[in-house]
Image: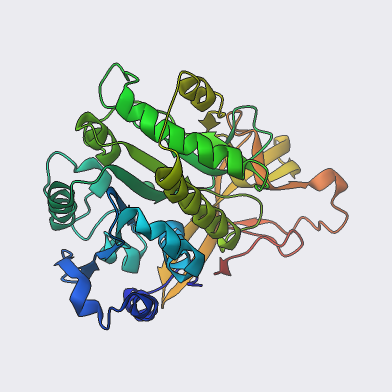
Amino acid sequence: MLARYYTYSQFESHFSKLIKRFKIESLNEIEIGTSVLGKSIYGLKLGSGNIKILAWSQMHGNESTTTRALCQLLETTDFDKELDNIQLYIIPILNPDGAQSWTRVNANNVDLNRDAVNLSQPESRLLRDIIDNFQPDYCFNLHGQRTIYGSLDGTSPIQMSFLSPAGDQERSVNEVRLKSMNVINRIYSQLKNEVTGSIGRYGDAFNINCIGDYLTSRNIPTILFEAGHAGNDYSRDKVTDLTTTSLKVAINTLNEDMSYNSKTLMEYNGIPSISSNYSDIMIKNYPSSDGLTTLFIQYHEQVKDENLYFIPILIGLNREEIINAHEVIDIDTCLSFTNDLIIEESLEVYSESLNIKIFTN
Ligand SMILES: [Zn+2]
């Protein structure tokens, strides 16, 4: 499996081996365009069936989980039988420059998921061309989520979330949205017992500049996958496996049961909403000059020398909107704490006794 961070050439070398199984000898055969900085973008077309699915990942460069899951899917030979009924078009990394530099935006500092109408960037225009030429019946819009999301009551982190995007300001539920809700419901019922965190439903506020909303407005059912985070899975290995399973269930659903009915919306609305109420680390009862304080720490992700570093940054004290954290340390019950916590001017936090330090992935 690819690690959470890979250089673009590491990805190319990995992907070129995976596609040999599909009788593609070289990546040159599947180059479909180039990024702002001239990196190749690839499109792999598999299967010969009637139902056409278009899936792209990493339009946000620092969200690698779904690319890793797509690669994992391609390695699974039992998935090949699904290709009899479908055509699957995969664009594994739409934003290679952002993937290399570990930024959300592309090399022109543009968020490609706010460029669906403007088409100001070569990567956005490429995706639009593929949509217009391939004419997908379904789209999978594959993303990764930050560590800040929890269930509404804050008792559980959101490990995966999904959305059937709105196609208009009124967020009307029409046939197009019911089709994608049906797929999400199937993924939810399969995965809800396999996760250590929760599965959530992403908010459906409408923004035509977001690709999913734009596609729904064009009557193309689209499913937003958000690979999230739970516990200490900073390598995101566990959530990569869950994402691969989600992709398999989605493809299987489109092979076998695309139907939706009067219960589809109700079932979909039964998936819990998500809230930004989590942090990476919470330190309770920290003795400060103002008395006992709760500290909230969030890792800042930075790529340097082809490594991904997680730098702990203090983001606030006593923040009421943050209910929980992936690691909760209570100084009251922490026998090894020696009050060695250092907060730099940059707000970087270190503590040997609490094991808070920069780590690499
Ligand atoms: Zn994203």
How does the figure colour the protein chain or chains? rainbow
Report whether 99 appears left or right of 217. Answer: right
Residue ID at (43%, 64%): 80
Report whether 215 appears left or right of 204. Answer: left
Q: Quadrant of the C terminus?
A: bottom right
Residue ID at (17%, 53%): 130
Rendered position, 9 above or below 186: below
Tell me the quarter of the picture where residue 157 sits: top right
Question: Residue 33, percent across and down?
Answer: 15, 65
Report whether 284 appears left or right of 259. Answer: right
Report whether 119 appears left or right of 225. Answer: left
228 or 284: nearer the viewer: 228
Count of number-bearing discs: 0
Residue 348 visible in image: no
Rendered position, 164 above or below 295: above
Question: Residue 188, percent across and down?
Answer: 56, 38
Residue ID at (23%, 31%): 219
50 or 226: nearer the viewer: 50
Question: Residue 176, percent across and down?
Answer: 30, 29
Residue ID at (15%, 71%): 38
Question: Residue 63, percent across and down?
Answer: 41, 56
Residue 181 visible in image: yes
41 or 303: nearer the viewer: 41
